[in-house]
Every structure is written in structure tokens, then in C-alpha cells.
Image (spheres, rainbow, N blue to C red):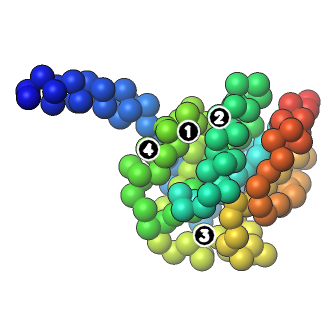
């Protein structure tokens, strides 16, 4: 019995070390993200654990990150009430721990959504395509993987 417990603990060890670092998304975080990526185009993808379409896109990002620069994909979890450990575990399960990962810092999700986009009603998934000059275009719904790949690979 003790060997079984030890084996289970050893198997779980890689999962805990591979969890994503989650940055706290606060009122001023969008400006920090845009500043960090100034002069480059990138995707800011807003998702939730209970969103099936979000999970499909997360699975596609796992494949895309093998072909596109990782710094061009930024993930933002909008589940303010969920524990960071649960969100980090989900990110790790999709193999996205090495991407830039953010999570709403508190349960005032409506306020944080408004800080992100005053015209966003909260539908998910929500994507923001930032061009090199800082302009952005928003999109609600699942992303077309082929079109996204072409956009992310452009210079």
C-alpha cells in the first residue's frame, strides 16, 4: 500500500512543477500587456474553464504554439471566483504553461471586463487581435485555426 501511495505522489510531481505562472489581471493590467508587446502583433485570448468553445481553442493553441512564436499568444482567464490552482492546472493540462497567462485578480469580473473592453458583454471566448501599431480588433466565438496561424505568423 505504501508503494502505491509513493508511486502516485511521484506521478503527480511533474504536474505540479509544470503549472503555469498566473499574472493577476487588475484595473491597469491591459496597459501593461499592450506596453509589453509594443511594436509586435499578438492575440489576447479571454477564456473560462466552463466554456467548451474556449477549451477547443486552448487545445488548438497547444498545436499552434509549436509553429508560431509563443509571445504572440496571451491568455486571460476570466474566472475571478475560481482558485488560481485550478486555472493553472487547466492551462498545464492543455500544455500552455509557457505562454503568458493572466487571471482576473478578483471577483469583480464585470469591472475587469469593462476595463478590458467597454463594449464587451462577457460572451466567451473573446479574442483581441493587436496589430504592430497598437490597434486592436475584437472577435467573439471560436477561432478558425488556419486563419489564426496565418495571422500569428505574419511579420
The disc placed on residue 94 is 1
Q: Is residue 84 above or below residue 98?
A: below
Name the one closer to the observer, 13 or 72: 13
Q: Position of residue 26 (x, y in %)?
A: 55, 62
Would you say the residues marked 3 and 2 are in contact, meaning their CB atoms lie under 8 Å apart?
A: no
Residue 25 visible in this rendered orientation of the protein: no
Q: Position of residue 21 (x, y in %)?
A: 47, 40
The disc placed on residue 106 is none
The disc placed on residue 89 is 4
The disc placed on residue 62 is 2
Foreground: disc 3 or disc 2: 2
Name which residue lies at 72% across and 50% down. 44
- What secondary structure is marked by label 2? helix
Q: Considering only order in the chain, which callout, 2 or 3, is on the residue closer to the N terminus? A: 2
- What secondary structure is marked by label 1? loop
Tell me the distance, in whole angstroms, between the alpha carbons under discs 1 and 4: 9 Å
Q: Considering only order in the chain, which callout, 3 or 1, is on the residue closer to the N terminus? A: 1
Q: Which residue is mark 3?
A: 112
Q: What count of labels does the image hold? A: 4
Name which residue lies at 70% across and 52% down. 45
Residue 52 visible in this rendered orientation of the protein: yes
Name the one closer to the observer, 63 or 88: 63
Amino acid at each position: 500500500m505504501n508503494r502505491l501511495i509513493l508511486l502516485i505522489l511521484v506521478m503527480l510531481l511533474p504536474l505540479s512543477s509544470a503549472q503555469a505562472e498566473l499574472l493577476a489581471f487588475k484595473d491597469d493590467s491591459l496597459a501593461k500587456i499592450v506596453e509589453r508587446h509594443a511594436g509586435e502583433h499578438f492575440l489576447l485570448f479571454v477564456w473560462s474553464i466552463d466554456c467548451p468553445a474556449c477549451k477547443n481553442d486552448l487545445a488548438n493553441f497547444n498545436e499552434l504554439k509549436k509553429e508560431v512564436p509563443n509571445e504572440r499568444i496571451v491568455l486571460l482567464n476570466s474566472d475571478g471566483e475560481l482558485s488560481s490552482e485550478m486555472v493553472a492546472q487547466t492551462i498545464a493540462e492543455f500544455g500552455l504553461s509557457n505562454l503568458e497567462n493572466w487571471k482576473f485578480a478578483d471577483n469583480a469580473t464585470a469591472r475587469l471586463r469593462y476595463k478590458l473592453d467597454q463594449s464587451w458583454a462577457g460572451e466567451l471566448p473573446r479574442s483581441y487581435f493587436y496589430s504592430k501599431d497598437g490597434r486592436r480588433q475584437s472577435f467573439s466565438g471560436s477561432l478558425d485555426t488556419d486563419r489564426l496561424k496565418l495571422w500569428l505568423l505574419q511579420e
